[in-house]
Image: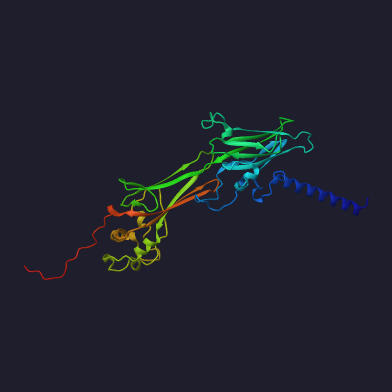
Amino acid sequence: MTNKQKGCLTTVIVLILVSVLVVGMLAAFTSGFTNWDVSTWFGSGQTEGGNANSDNETNDMSGAVVNAPAGSGVFMSVARIAEADYAAYGVSPHAETAYTVTATVVPSTADDKSLDRSVAWSNGVSEWASGKNVTDYLTVTPVSGGAASATLACLQPFGEQITVKCTSRQNPDASATCTVDYYKRIETLDAGMSDGVNTVKLSSGGNIPFSSDMMFSLSAEYTDGTAEEYTHTAKVEFTAAFEEHAENFTDDYIGGMKIGDFFGRGYSGEYTLNYGDVSNTFFEALCYSDNGGSYTIDDDSYLVDVFYRALKSYSGNAFTFTLTSEGESTGTVKSVSYDVGVDVSDITTGVASVTLEPGSIFI
């Protein structure tokens, strides 16, 4: 054989090997050439989309998540099923999350490639799992008896990790496993304000107590889950209507000038609330000049009163509270906002000065 013939033969062999590799990858990604939705080819780390839904959640990676499979003699690949495709895969429309799980037997020349699958609690004696039927939470359904492909469906949140196992019928020692976690979701996210006497849950259109000392609290309720921690933040800012009112408010203490003219335009856009005592800083931090002016509201207690009087003369929603929770592992974000007014009945303002009217005094 000439060198030219050897070179041609080598090229042909390389092309054949590349073709086999490409076909194998397509088979794995498409769940045995049955799934041509490219967005689901790369496993459990992908979602169907990143747009906010009606619950104000974005990048929702919570729910059942399949961890990387491991095996010996049998290998698994996993792809998430888009909710719109549930019917095509025979998945109940009530399922929370669903995946295709495809097993590959090694070697490919094995005479019997039939497989059995099972699901079980990773720790069946844990406090949460004890007495619970795992298939009430997660099911695995082969396409047919012993088939390479199966559908994994999460029916409801669970609080103990689940193990999925795929075993060769011909050789029980050849198997693959993967674990499934449930990254808990936030069911409700609420906040409240308290002045020590009155406590009010934030709600759009409602009034919050407002006095020199307030307590702010934020609470969340979750589904069951095996993983995920959330970080909560809450911010408050003026509504556009109140900011306009405040900037145009006139007070004798500032010589009949408008607040906006006295301080200059431009109040701080938002203030991050902390847990615990909010005190005056809640209001003062929103009402300072941030355009290089020489005064800020906390320079003078009477300047604080100016803003208090502006608040007392206003009717309507004065503040927007925005509550946000973000999953540390999944990046899931849930946000809710409230436009609220203020109960000004407990707000008192001080006396700035005392003057005598000019006139004659007779003794």
The mark tally for this picture is 0
Image quarter of residue 142: top right
Residue 53's x, y, as percent? 52, 51
Image quarter of residue 313: bottom left
Q: Is residue 162 left or right of residue 2?
A: left
Q: Residue at x 40, y 62 (%)?
A: 240
Position of residue 290 relative to residue 161, above or below, is below
Q: Is residue 250 left or right of residue 22?
A: left
Q: Is residue 344 left or right of residue 174?
A: left
Query: Taking the image as drawn, is residue 143 in sight?
Result: yes
Query: Taking the image as drawn, is residue 276 in sight?
Result: no
Position of residue 247 relative to residue 39, above or below, is below
| Viewport quadrant of the C terminus | bottom left
Name of the residue lying farthest toward the left: 363
Residue 110's x, y, as percent? 78, 35
Residue 95's x, y, as percent? 57, 41
Residue 270's x, y, as percent? 42, 57
Comparing 36 with 128, the one in front is: 36
